[in-house]
Amino acid sequence: MEHFDILVIGGGAAGIAAAKAAVEAGCHSVALVDRKPALGGVLLQCAHRGFGAGLTGREYAQTLLRDFPKEVRLFLGTTVLSVEETKIARLSGGRILSFEQLIYAAGCRELPVGALPIAGTRPKGVYTAGQMQERMNLSGVLPKGPVVILGSGDIGLILAAQLAARDISVTLVEQKDACGGLSRNRRCLEDYPIRLICSQTIEILRGEDTLEGCVLSGGEYLPCKTLLIAAGLRPDRALLADLGTQPWLHLCGNCNTIHPMVEGVTAEGTKVGIGAAITLRRRENAEETAGEWMRQTVPPPQSVPGSGAMPGSSEAPAR
Amino acid sequence: MKPVDAAVIGGGILGCFAARNLRRWSISTVLLEQAEDVCTGITRANSAIVYPGYDNKPGSRKGEMTVRGNAGFDTLCQELEVPFNRCGSVLVTYDGETLPRLWKKWEQGVQNGVPGLRLLTGGEAEAMEPMLKPGVKAALYAPSTGTVNPWQLGIAAFENAVKNGAIPLLKTAVTGMEKTESGYLLKTTGEDIFCKVVVNCAGLSADRVQELLFPPSVRLHWDGAEYLVLDKQAQKPGRIVFHQAQSCGKGITAIPCVEGNLLISGVRKPIAAPYATTPEGLRALYAQAMDLLPGLDLTQVIRSFGAVRPNPYRQTGESIHDFCIENPAPGFFSLMGIKTPGLTCANELGMYLAEQTAAYLGAERNPDFDPHRNAIPKTEDPEIVCQCEGITRSEILEAIRRGAATVDGVKRRVGSGMGACQGSRCSFAIEGLLEEVRHGAL
């Protein structure tokens, strides 16, 4: 079993920022685990501009990683199987790590079609938007058109623009009465012949083996070969399900709350990274101070009234 | 292909168990399945319940087989290395009108020999399952009820049948049938098959398969039910909860599955299209689930699906309530419209068919029969492909080696894609592995 003062789970924007900040704040025993073989998380599959100052997701990740501290021990292509109350994490491949502070930056996951009250059959050709984005941008495989996208938020719009630019017919279906998403992403509706249907949702899927079309709540039938679900993101905290709140557990990024912009994710990662390092330092100080105080003071601590400055307490004196 | 003793038509769970049990005797056996994999039809969409046996009339085939099948499930699942959870069940009723149904089931259960059956007061039932809506009038507790994954069990039986020498012929549909001097000739989409005995386990099509050679006797009418699957994290009852709704028909059922998910099964009703759900049906199911278990978190639903059941009717229009096993000519056996509790009785029905076949052929016991099948072992491979369920690359490759031909086939063997993301993070990776194996790269 290897020990690290801080363990970061997740190597996306939040995890990268947190690990960097923790080292900068003086913690030199940091490990980061990510299931993918490279750092960057979901940024790596984002080929569109809109990150930081007009960068693509990949470029933004490269910028973040430019001065990534070498002290951070990386476990890539590795999945965390469980986190236990005794402050240990079990990794795929049988490795076990112990830690003092855990920064959880595992991002979010998309709502699958099954989570939505959509009836009909369960044919092939239905994917989540992010799943298709990864496929398109990392493997270069395009979905079969015509494509229907459920949800006109940023993710839906970005995908629609990308598909339309490749001459694939796209229809966006939006439950609300107007298109969601940032205005810069809405521009694709003017640039391309993308049909937007508002105030409706998809009610029924048709097709036995492969998707043939979908029926909208208004009754219209849209023939399509691919349906992409861009209906929402959920913080991914599956690993923490049995843990409850722990004083050593810190969440940042989209597993904490869904951020509309990557800058918010990075900022939160940085803040939490510094916070975890400070917590560690404070405790070291408290232990040192308490040790000195013990040497100097007789009788032992329990006879001292109002001993608020106990090791680990938030009132411990700062150096 | 050289002539065989027995041809099993249909690779659902019933056909797989028929083939497995036929090999307990020295009966050469082929198993024909029209799809590219076994257990892709009715078996795939099932309530996963191992029933205790109080629903059926004393003396009926269903009643006897269910109690016997249930009692044998621990041994069966040990032999086939399939997880089984004898979680127990409570059948609850909220209105006085349905109480007589409860008494009747209790009496039937006692007569059928269901172990540990107990009537509970409403308070006792609510204490046992605190998620239940208050106001339970009475309940029937059955500790022997259990859950098992239907397709895992079917695939395990299939693997065991093949291990014992049954020959699988996948992507092979029967298109015609003739009587020969020594038995039957099956015309298929592949090669012709000469056999002495036909065991028809064709599920939804069993009536049409029999009618390839015989005049119509039983007609199958399909109906179905809708289901919701909740994430493992969702709060769930500890036992299976059956709701005795109106004086006729069953209400919804909540099933805490062996995998840890909660399955909610809706009421049976006529269906528009096989395996399809309807918007009205799903809406009703959401509402009924919340009514029975008000604490349920339906934002944890990760999948909904439709199931199909074949219901057997005589030509006169009379419904057949017991298991219908037709024997229209010597050496020809048909399972007609086996529905609930078909999963509980799958091995029993297979045994029955094998015994009948063995008696007809005068076959000897197969001394080399090995009832044991090894499950796909969990590995400590660092490469996890399915993040939600922690399924490794080597486990997936083993599933492919054992016959998974599609992402779904892999799912049915190792459980990949069954988690909260429903395969959105792993299905392309698994497709890639299937592709690599197909092209000999792995």
Image: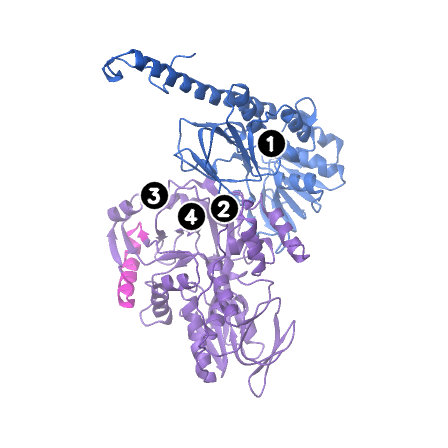
Chain colours: A blue, B purple
- Residue B131 is marked as 3
First reached walking from the N terminus: tag 3 or tag 2: 3
- Residue A25, x across and y down, in percent: 52, 18
Is the same chain shared between marks 1 and 2?
A: no
- Residue B260 is marked as 4
| A231 relative to B83 in the view: left or right | right
Q: For mark 1, what is the residue?
A: A177
Q: CA distance from mark 4 to mark 2?
A: 11 Å
Comparing marks 3 and 1, which lies closer to the viewer?
A: 3
Is the same chain shared between marks 3 and 1?
A: no
> Foreground residue, A106 or B213?
A106
Q: Amino acid at mark 2?
A: Glu
Q: CA distance from mark 4 to mark 3?
A: 16 Å
- Taking the magenta stretch, the answer to whether it contains residue B282 is no
Q: For mark 2, what is the residue?
A: B389
Rendered residue at 63%/34% (across/down): A155
> Foreground residue, B324 or B5?
B5
- Residue numbers of the magenta segment: B91-115
First reached walking from the N terminus: tag 4 or tag 3: 3
Comparing marks 3 and 2, which lies closer to the viewer?
A: 2
